[in-house]
Image (cartoon, rainbow, N blue to C red):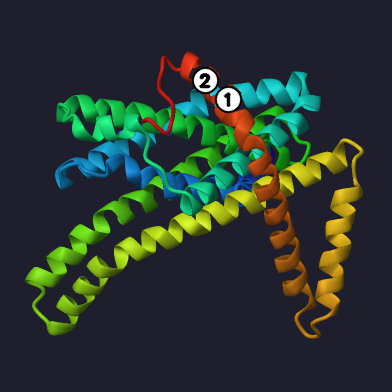
Amino acid sequence: MSGLLALLDDVVAIAKIAAASVDDVMGQAIKAGAKASGAVIDDAAVTPKFVHGFEPARELPIVWRIAVGSIRNKLLVLLPAALLLSAFAPWLITPLLMLGGMYLCFEGAEKVVHVIRPHHGPEHKAAAATPENPLHLEEQKVAGAIKTDFILSAEIMTIILAAIPESTFWLEAATLAVAGIGITAVVYGGVALIVKADDVGLLMAERGRFAVTRAVGRAIVRGMPGFLTVLTTVGTAAMLWVGGSIVVHGLESLGFAWLGHQIHDWAVAAGHAVSGAEAAVEWIAKAAMDGVFGLALGLALIPIGLSLVAPLWKLVTGGGDKKAA
């Protein structure tokens, strides 16, 4: 009997350890995922364009195919790469994180420039004038979306890796997997709701039994274009803020702390100027300054991206880039 009780005690102890490990994984995954918010919002803002123009019946299957490709990107390629990086070259995490931050700044600045000076190149016009087979077009769109997702997922997984405290190999692996799957579910679940919202609104407006239902449906249909614009704007601002803060923090880690200290001091001064809301004002001021720095950095990187990085990307991906996709 005493042996059985000892065995039960051991089982209970193991269960407690396992439960604590699960709590650690979930807690770290949530915290790390929150730090990847800029790339996550951008992912949610970018993806709906890949289903634009398709029959409503094909929208959710396309989103599902992209989501499955995103999971493959994260679990089969990026997670092993992140674990190898953490085990054998942890010194590379900060430089890679800064590269990801610079990419976010570049993308955000490019979107700002496009809003200020919209342009449609001859390639875009020619492509728009040439009808394509729907199945072939769907394959192209899905492939392009998965390529775009790979870049954003690489940023997300690197940010998550850098946010995980030093721990065991298996805890890091589990945290990366949980955060990656959770972020994918949030992003593509949100995308599915976004792309079907106008269809639901139209159905409510046409077939609603009550006047309020029909009114809500019409409001959804009218509001979706504005909502997508707001989502894109928020995504761009988040990219510049997160990208700028990543680069600033990376410079501090590499010994170039002047800019980070200056931003911190200015933010603290702004917080002290508003009594009763010091913490909120300080956070907003720091985020705004990180975003302004991210925009300036992104604008400086645009010529490099267009003249060097874009041609190399086309060469690597077989002649297509994420804009063309």
Residue 169: image x %, image y %? 70, 28
Q: Give the residue drawn at x 19%, y 58%.
A: 199
* Helix, strand or loop for disc 2: helix
The residue to which callout 2 is attached is: 311
Return the residue nearer the eye: 217 or 79: 217
Residue 129's place in the image compared with 190, above or below, is above
Q: Give the residue drawn at x 34%, y 44%.
A: 49
Judged left or right of residue 73, residue 237 is right
Query: Marks 1 and 2, Cα distance to the nearest angstrom?
Result: 7 Å
Return the residue nearer the eye: 236 or 87: 236
In the figure, residue 243 lies in which quadrant? Answer: top right
Q: Give the residue drawn at x 20%, y 66%.
A: 201
Q: Give the residue drawn at x 15%, y 64%.
A: 202
Q: How crowded is mark 1: few (under 14 residues within 10 Å), some or many (20 or more)?
A: few
Image quarter hosting the N terminus:
top right
Residue 291's place in the image compared with 266, above or below, is above
Judged left or right of residue 214, residue 37 is right
**Circle 1: residue type:** Ser
Residue 152: image x %, image y %? 53, 36
Return the residue nearer the eye: 29 or 238: 238
In the figure, residue 323 lies in which quadrant? Answer: top left
Residue 152's place in the image compared with 35, above or below, is above
For residue 296, say whether it is visible: yes
**Circle 2: residue type:** Pro
Judged left or right of residue 99, residue 238 is left
Residue 25: image x %, image y %? 63, 44
Q: Which of marks 1 and 2 is in front?
A: 1
In the figure, residue 269 lies in which quadrant? Answer: bottom right
For residue 16, say whether it is visible: no
Q: Which mark is residue 307?
A: 1
* Helix, strand or loop for disc 1: helix
Image marks 1 and 2: residues in contact by CB distance under 8 Å: yes
